[in-house]
């Protein structure tokens, strides 16, 4: 049996012998290792998304309508600052010092040549239709940032923040790895500077466009693994010759949920067969 990848969404197997969808929202939390001067900031749940520790990625699809038309977008990622006060749901262990004003900085972007990552600001309730800043692929010392604390930088105030209606998009198909870090932009520390030192850089992977992560064969069955944004339906298609256009469904459509999913061809024939995933709907 021979298995080889042809491209991001098509694989070939060589056999030897015989409703309106809802929007998902993932939270990445910013906090601090202590509340004293120069204590380091951190992402409290960053390990779950760290591209250097595992294969997790945020899937994105090309939007053909709505405010992000022409850009690749997946689920909403909400960077959130941990609360210190009960009225904001605190105190949550790992919150930053009172008076700290946390922001997330886009330090680096790696990906397809000529591509970029864009941040779209929201008003807390709804999406807004313009790019706030864009960071090109190849950036290694970026300074653009988005505030995540909602305290206005006032002294002795809760560093908490939880702002919705924000988006991250990419401009080209392919895999992007983006470096984020938490910084304190307040002037409430020693000498009128920050209270906290910056966090380590968290590398987060975005996959623009569908990709088959893995494919397995079991007798006459073929199972493909993939991730897709919530609300996007995808179909596994197959053909016996790449030169033709006779792609046929090999399994029933499956709606994405942002987790790793599998879709199975239960009647894979003997001989060469090529597979691809195709997105069959879009979101505004």
Image (cartoon, grey):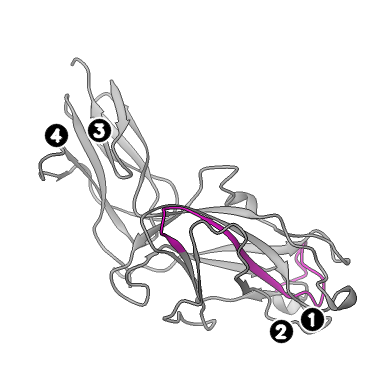
Task: Give whichever of discs 4 and 3 has the lower sequence position.
Answer: 3
Q: Is residue 110 left or right of residue 160?
A: left
How many C-alpha atoms fall within 10 Å of the one at disc 4: few (<14), some, or many (≥20)? Answer: some
How many C-alpha atoms fall within 10 Å of the one at disc 1: few (<14), some, or many (≥20)? Answer: some
How far is mark 1 from mark 4, CA to CA?
A: 64 Å
The residue identified by callout 4 is: 240
For the residues labelled 2 and 1, say whether their Cβ atoms are less than 8 Å apart: yes
The residue identified by callout 3 is: 12
Q: Quadrant of residue 262?
A: top left
How many C-alpha atoms fall within 10 Å of the one at disc 3: few (<14), some, or many (≥20)? Answer: many
Chief secondary structure of the magenta span? loop
For the residues labelled 2 and 4, say whether their Cβ atoms are less than 8 Å apart: no
91 is within the stretch colored magenta: yes
Q: Is residue 267 visible?
A: no
The residue identified by callout 1 is: 157
The residue identified by callout 2 is: 152
For numbered disc 3, what is the local secondary structure?
strand
Q: Is residue 88 left or right of residue 4?
A: right
For numbered disc 2, what is the local secondary structure?
loop
Is residue 54 shown above or below 180?
above
Task: Give whichever of discs 2 and 4 has the lower sequence position.
Answer: 2
Task: Give whichever of discs 2 and 3 has the lower sequence position.
Answer: 3
What quarter of the picture does the N terminus occupy?
top left
């Amino acid at each position: 049996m021979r298995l080889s990848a042809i491209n991001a969404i098509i694989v070939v197997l060589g056999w030897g012998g015989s409703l309106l969808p809802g929007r998902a929202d993932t939270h990445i939390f910013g906090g601090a290792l202590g509340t004293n001067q120069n204590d380091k900031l951190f992402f409290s749940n960053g390990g779950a998304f760290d591209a250097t520790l595992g294969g997790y990625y945020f899937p994105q699809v090309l939007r053909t309508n709505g405010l992000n038309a022409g850009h690749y977008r997946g689920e909403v990622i909400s960077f959130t600052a941990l609360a210190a006060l009960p009225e904001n749901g605190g105190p949550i262990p790992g919150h930053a010092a009172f008076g700290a004003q946390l922001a997330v900085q886009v330090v680096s972007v790696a990906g397809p040549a000529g591509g970029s990552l864009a941040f779209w600001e929201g008003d807390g309730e709804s999406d807004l239709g313009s790019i706030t800043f864009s960071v090109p692929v190849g950036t290694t010392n970026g300074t653009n940032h988005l505030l995540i604390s909602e305290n206005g930088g006032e002294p002795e105030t809760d560093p908490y923040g939880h702002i919705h209606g924000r988006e991250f998009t990419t401009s080209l198909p392919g895999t992007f790895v983006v470096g984020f870090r938490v910084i304190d932009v307040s002037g409430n520390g020693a000498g009128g500077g920050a209270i906290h030192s910056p966090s380590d850089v968290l590398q987060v992977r975005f996959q623009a466009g569908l990709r088959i992560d893995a494919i397995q064969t079991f007798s006459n069955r073929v199972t493909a693994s993939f991730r897709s944004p919530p609300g996007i339906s995808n179909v596994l298609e197959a053909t016996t010759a790449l030169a033709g256009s006779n792609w046929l469904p090999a399994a029933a459509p499956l709606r994405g949920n942002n987790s790793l999913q599998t879709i199975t061809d239960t009647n894979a024939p003997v001989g060469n067969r090529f597979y691809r995933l195709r997105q069959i709907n879009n979101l505004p």
